Amino acid sequence: MALSVEFGDVISPELNARVRALEHLIRARGVGGVVETVPSYRSLLVYYDPFVVAYGALIAALKELLPHARPAALPPSRLVELPATYGGDLGFDLDAAAKKLGLGPDELARLHAGAEYLVHFIGFTPGLPYMGGLPDRLAIPRLEQPRTATPPGSIGIGGAQCCIYSVESPGGFWIIARTPLRLYDPAAADPVLLRPGDRVRFRMIGRAEYQALAAAVAAGTFTPAITPE
């Protein structure tokens, strides 16, 4: 069974921090009967075993934690650097997105790579991050007709969000770049690269470096640049 804790009805870093703080406190305090937690922009879905904890008892435990579910309760965040190649066949929507926004492709790429992004939550497919922090100038409606397949590693923008496709899947975001890193690797000790609360920066790289890094990732010799706060 499950219950949802709703914190609001808007997308904001502050609201999302409270969602993530409650999830952290549930784990840190070892709230009995909780099987899994699933954060979103503004809410936390809590799966629980009714044979271990009654609904009323779980509500009481969560209400006790809620006043403490603040950013100060969160562990230090991580800064993750993701190499990315913009345009061409790797960022195949860059030119069209730039035209729709009234920008040059290079300017769009520069604005996108110059921002810092916050991972609000992971969802849709394993390891796919929904990220805030997209510059206002790059806000763009999603594609009118979503594509049926998007390559893994594709970096997309849509609305006020940025995401990175972790596996091949349908999608309606404008693909402006691609990273050679694997966002989801089921064979890895830690299959999901990014975590809610991570801060992400993109480092622009050329096609030759992309290919070299892709080879290193495939060989298991590449270590992503992750810095604790």
Image (cartoon, rainbow, N blue to C red):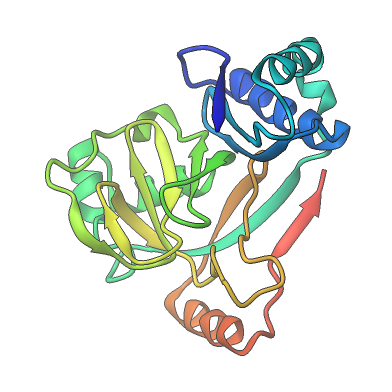
Q: Is residue 218 above or below residue 122?
A: below
How many labels were placed on the picture?
0
Q: Is residue 196 visible?
A: yes
Horizontal side of 62 relative to 143 (left or right) equals right
Q: Is residue 115 visible?
A: no
Judging depth in this view, the residue of 186 and 176 nearest the camera is: 186
Judging depth in this view, the residue of 49 and 115 nearest the camera is: 49
Residue drawn at the location 43% of the way across and 77% of the way down? 207
Q: Is residue 137 above or below residue 168?
A: above
Q: Quadrant of the C terminus?
A: top right
Residue drawn at the location 40% of the way across and 51% of the way down? 109
Residue drawn at the location 83% of the way across and 25% of the way down? 73
> Where residue 35 sits: x, y (%)?
67, 42
Outermost left residue: 145
> Where residue 182 sits: x, y (%)?
54, 69
Q: Is residue 142 above or below residue 204?
A: above
Question: Which of the 4 image quadrants contains residue 46?
Answer: top right
Judging depth in this view, the residue of 168 and 210 nearest the camera is: 168
Horizontal side of 29 relative to 13 (left or right) equals right
> Where residue 141 sits: x, y (%)?
23, 33
Horizontal side of 218 relative to 174 (left or right) equals right
Q: Quadrant of the N terminus?
A: top right
Question: Which of the 4 image quadrants contains residue 43?
Answer: top right
Residue drawn at the location 72% of the way across and 48% of the way down? 79
Outermost front residue: 51
Question: Which of the 4 image quadrants contains residue 101?
Answer: top left
> Where residue 185 sits: x, y (%)?
56, 71
